[in-house]
C-alpha cells in the first residue's frame, strides 16, 4: 500500500469516527454500507438497524 493510499484510508476512518461523535452529540445516527453490501443505520446507542428500500423514500 502506498503512502497516499494509507493516508486516504486514515482520512476515511477519521471521517467515520467524527460522524459517530457528531451523531452521539446530537442524538442522531449515521448511515453506511456494510462489507456485505447491506445499508444500515447506526444509532449513537450502538444499535444497528438494517434499512430497506422504503427507508430511502422521502416525501
Image: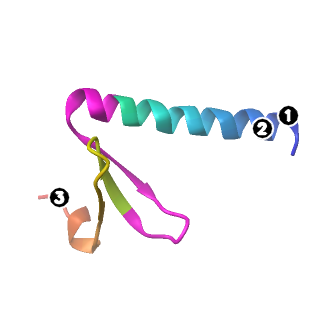
Residue bearing mark 3: 58
Outermost residue, left direction?
59
Separation (CA) of disc 1 from disc 3:
40 Å
Residue bearing mark 1: 3
Q: Is 30 covered by the magenta stretch?
A: yes
Residue 10: x %, y % from top left: 67, 35
Residue 38: x %, y % from top left: 43, 69
Point out which mark residue 6 bears: 2
SS state under label 3 = loop
Q: Quadrant of residue 12?
A: top right
Name the colour scheme. Answer: rainbow
Residue 58: x %, y % from top left: 17, 58
Q: Identify the magenta region.
A: 22-39
Residue at image location 49% in from the left, 62% down from the top: 34
Q: Are marks 1 and 2 in contact (CB under 8 Å)?
A: yes
Is residue 43 shown above or below 23?
below
Q: Is 26 covered by the magenta stretch?
A: yes
Residue at image location 28% in from the left, 54% down from the top: 47
Which of discs 1 and 3 lies nearer the camera? The answer is 1
Separation (CA) of disc 1 from disc 2:
5 Å
Is residue 41 shown above or below 14?
below
Amino acid at each position: 500500500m502506498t503512502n497516499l493510499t494509507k493516508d486516504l484510508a486514515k482520512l476515511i476512518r477519521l471521517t467515520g469516527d467524527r460522524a459517530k461523535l457528531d451523531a452521539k452529540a446530537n442524538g442522531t445516527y449515521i448511515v453506511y454500507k456494510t462489507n456485505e453490501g447491506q445499508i444500515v443505520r447506526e444509532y449513537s446507542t450502538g444499535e444497528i438497524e438494517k434499512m430497506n428500500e422504503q427507508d430511502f423514500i422521502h416525501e
